[in-house]
Image (spheres, grey):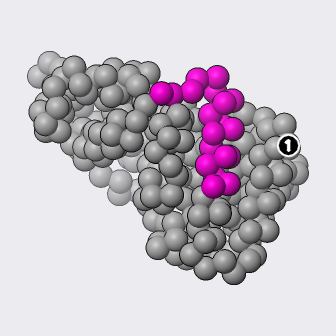
Amino acid sequence: MQTRDLGVAKQIFVVEMVVSEISEVRFESVGFKKEFGFQLLRLEDVFYREPSSERHPFKSSRINFFTIILVTEGEMTHEVDFTKYKMTKGDCIFISKGQIHKFDPSPVYKGYGLVFTEAYMLHYISPSALSKISFLYNNHLSPLNFNDDGDLDDLIRTMKKEFSYELGSIKADVVASMLTVFLLKAQLRTGDVLRTNRRDHQQFTRFQNLVASKYMETRKARQYAALLNMTYKQLNEVCKVITRKTAKEYIDAYVALEAKRRLALTE
């Protein structure tokens, strides 16, 4: 990056979010139990809950957890990172942690929302299953959005029934098994099944978090590799496996998206 470009970037990013309707929503801030890390909700219940300063379904909010939305009745337009997605019965969309989204303010539709933390996913989903799922990490660049043929809806209804039982510690494992099936079936919709391992995901998550905290300071992939105690080649290989992008391509895409967010939400 040339010095002049860096100066322009600083001018763009130096403005803080002073005038903005965006809110930072944490899993536990909306009444979810952090120790469990997973919730299954009806969309209509989300809409009619009392809004708070941290959570308002019809205003833009950045989430620190994963969200899956499945429409079962009606139609809606869901906005993710300022792109609007038309959804109707059977449509499903995945929203990654860190993304900005908001619901259609005319809720004449019904459906379900599955929300879960990254800690829950890494703890309960088996390494072999996780190694085949890519869209949860690549989702912020291009959300997975498809029409379900009915099997995911059936799976959610079964999951909902399990939530009504008092199974103690077993409940978490039962529900996690169903979520694993859900995610694997969704991955099949992408036509691209990964062959990675848990170490790849752990390394990529470290890289992802580092970019989020230091993209204002540097956009050089080699510097991130050094901070992670990895070689440039190793970092590139991990990024390609998880996102189908090089480390530099991932960084540039992330910075471009953050620029778009700030330009749209600040004065």
Above or below, comparing residue 258 to residue 164 in the picture: above
Residue, x 62% and y 43% (percent of image)? Answer: 183
- Tell me if mark 1 has few (under 14), some (14-19) or many (20+) residues whose alpha carbon lies within 10 angstroms of its own: few
- What secondary structure predominates along the stretch shown in magenta? helix
Q: Residue 125 at what x, y percent from top left?
A: 52, 52
Q: Residue 104 at what x, y percent from top left?
A: 71, 51
Asked whether residue 4 is in view, the answer is no
State the image quarter where residue 202 is shown: top left
The number of numbered discs placed on residues in the rendered structure image is: 1
The magenta span reads 177-195
Would you say residue 152 sits in the magenta stretch?
no
Residue, x 63% and y 55% (percent of image)? Answer: 177
Q: Residue 108 at what x, y percent from top left?
A: 85, 56
Horizontal arrangement in the rendering, residue 37 relative to residue 254 (left or right): right
Horizontal arrangement in the rendering, residue 79 relative to residue 135 (left or right): right
Horizontal arrangement in the rendering, residue 186 relative to residue 98 (left or right): right
Pick whichever, 89 or 37, lies toward us: 37
Would you say residue 180 sits in the magenta stretch?
yes
Above or below, comparing residue 162 to residue 64 in the picture: below
According to the picture, the residue beneath numbered tag 1 turns out to be 150
Pick whichever, 48 or 199, lies toward us: 199
State the image quarter where residue 232 is shown: top left
Above or below, comparing residue 47 to residue 219 in the picture: below
Above or below, comparing residue 110 to residue 259 in the picture: below
Asked whether residue 143 is in view, the answer is yes
- Label 1 SS: loop
Pick whichever, 22 or 159, lies toward us: 159
Q: Residue 67 at what x, y percent from top left?
A: 59, 52
